[in-house]
Image (tube, rainbow, N blue to C red):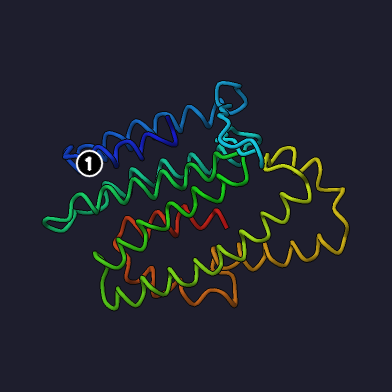
Amino acid sequence: LLVFLPIAAFIAILFGAPSRLTAIAASALNLALGIYAAFSWKCTCWTFSVPVLEKPALNLAFGFTDGMSAIMVLLSVIVTLAAVLSGKAPEGKEKLYYGSSLLISGGALGAFAATDLFFFFAFHELALIPTFLMIGMLGRGDRREAAWKITIYLGLGSIVLLAGLVWLANLTGTYDMVKMVAAAGSIDPASQKSIAALLIVGFGTLVSLFPFHSWAAPAYASAPAPVAMLHAGVLQKFG
């Protein structure tokens, strides 16, 4: 519910549901769920897993293995509702404006709640698509240049990150993040350093760590309010 409610609301908006009303209703319901989750994150009711692929073993898996995920989810649902309420969509662009805001939120929630490394990465990438569209089509100033800059920087950063994550999964023999942590001690020191370098560059680009930061200022200056709030306030915490 937490992860797929915003995505379902996005689909409903595409098929003609009232954009602003649907976005507000979905965001408000998710805020209630997020608050409940933050206070009950140890409950097994938040553990969910569906097999997707046998080899390599990929599972659409969610859960709160520690309190950090619950805090990030709570942050996401609070900022989502604030972002939806923060401004008025341009005339004729309501579907794009509210639908993209929900899709960014769904991607962030999926990334923070995922316990499978593949889907941890995949949900974050999902959130970048509406970010590009919103900046490029509804942004201010040099919005197209800013949209391409953020896409190129984050795309390259994601490729480097993916290489590190896949390497890590291959050495530990699992994409399950809990099992991966337990098996990490068996990785030889040389490989650890190489993987760490890839992850620092990949995550560093996504979080705009110096010297991979030059995309951030023009992107946020050009972005509509919901994108700036959700990407800077929530999605960067992925990095």
**Of 32 and 126, which appears nearest the observer?**
126
Up-down relation of residue 79 to residue 61 (above or below): below
Q: Residue furthest left?
A: 91
Up-down relation of residue 97 to residue 150 (above or below): above
Left-right relation of 60 to 108? right
Left-right relation of 198 to 39? right
Q: Secondary structure at mark 1?
A: helix
The residue depicted at 18 percent of the width and 51 percent of the height is 94
For label 1, the residue is: 13
Up-down relation of residue 119 to residue 225 (above or below): above
The residue depicted at 38 percent of the width and 73 percent of the height is 148
Residue 223 percent coordinates (x, y): 32, 66
Left-right relation of 224 to 176? left
Which quadrant: the C terminus? bottom right
The residue depicted at 29 percent of the width and 68 percent of the height is 136
Which quadrant: the N terminus? top left
Up-down relation of residue 177 to residue 146 (above or below): above
Residue 75 percent coordinates (x, y): 47, 44
Determine crowd level at label 1: few under 14, some 14-19, many 20+ residues with C-alpha closer than 10 A: many
Q: Residue 43 appears in which quarter of the rendering? A: top right
**Of 119 and 113, which appears nearest the observer?**
119
Residue 62 percent coordinates (x, y): 56, 34
Q: Residue furthest front?
A: 55
Residue 80 percent coordinates (x, y): 37, 45
Left-right relation of 135 to 41? left
Please, what is the three-letter code of the amino acid marked with disc 1?
A: Ile
The residue depicted at 64 percent of the width and 35 percent of the height is 54
